[in-house]
Image: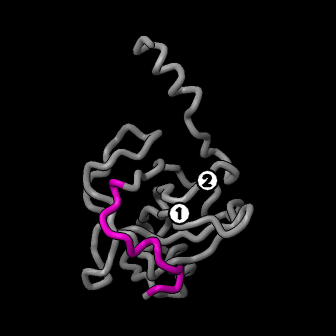
Amino acid sequence: MSRKGFLRINDILREDYSSSAGWKENLLFSEMNNFDIGRLTSGRFIIRDSARTHPVFLLRKIERDSFTFCPCSSQEYNSQNSSYIRKGAMTPPSRIPIDKNSYILHSLSFNLNGSSREIDRLPVRGLVAAEDIVGNLHKRGAGYE
């Protein structure tokens, strides 16, 4: 098959993340407001600047339109007990690599409906490949601390 043919098939098979029906584990969203993260984590997420944002990671699908998310940070808060998305990872459909290690703060997880105002308009960064996640702690139960 020609390269042009392969690229066309790749475009056809590309996932659609525009609605929560297409969301799956390891999907990364960008730009959730720190204030919202702080509220959703019952104040456990430290808010230094409420005008700033952090990415959020989809840990698991709970039911049809309910999901468990957790914030990500360039700082590791869990005393060397964190999984992280490695610097340089690609997250298709985005063509921009992750610019620094992004720690998955699984101990600060929260549940949301896919149509909730906090998540439904966030930009989808893309799907993180399993080989781009260092560590397995993000796979433990949502209440893991």
Range of residues picked out in magenta: 131-144
- Mark 1–mark 2 Cα distance, whole angstroms, equals 8 Å
Q: Quadrant of residue 106?
A: bottom left
Residue at 28 percent across and 58 percent down: it is: 86
For residue 77, above or below residue 67: below
Q: Is residue 29 visible?
A: no
| 141 to 91, vertically: above or below | below
* Residue type beneath disc 2: Trp
Whether residue 26 is in magenta: the answer is no
Q: From what the image shows, is residue 110 above or below residue 33?
A: below
Q: Is residue 89 left or right of residue 114?
A: left
Give the numbered dot on residue 23.
2
Q: Quadrant of residue 18?
A: top right
Return the x and y of residue 29 as percentages of the image width and height.
49, 56
- Circle 1 — which element? strand
Position in image of residue 56 (x %, y %) = 48, 64
Q: Quadrant of the N terminus?
A: top left
Q: Is residue 139 magenta?
A: yes
| Quarter the C terminus occupies | bottom left
Q: How is the image coloured?
A: one colour
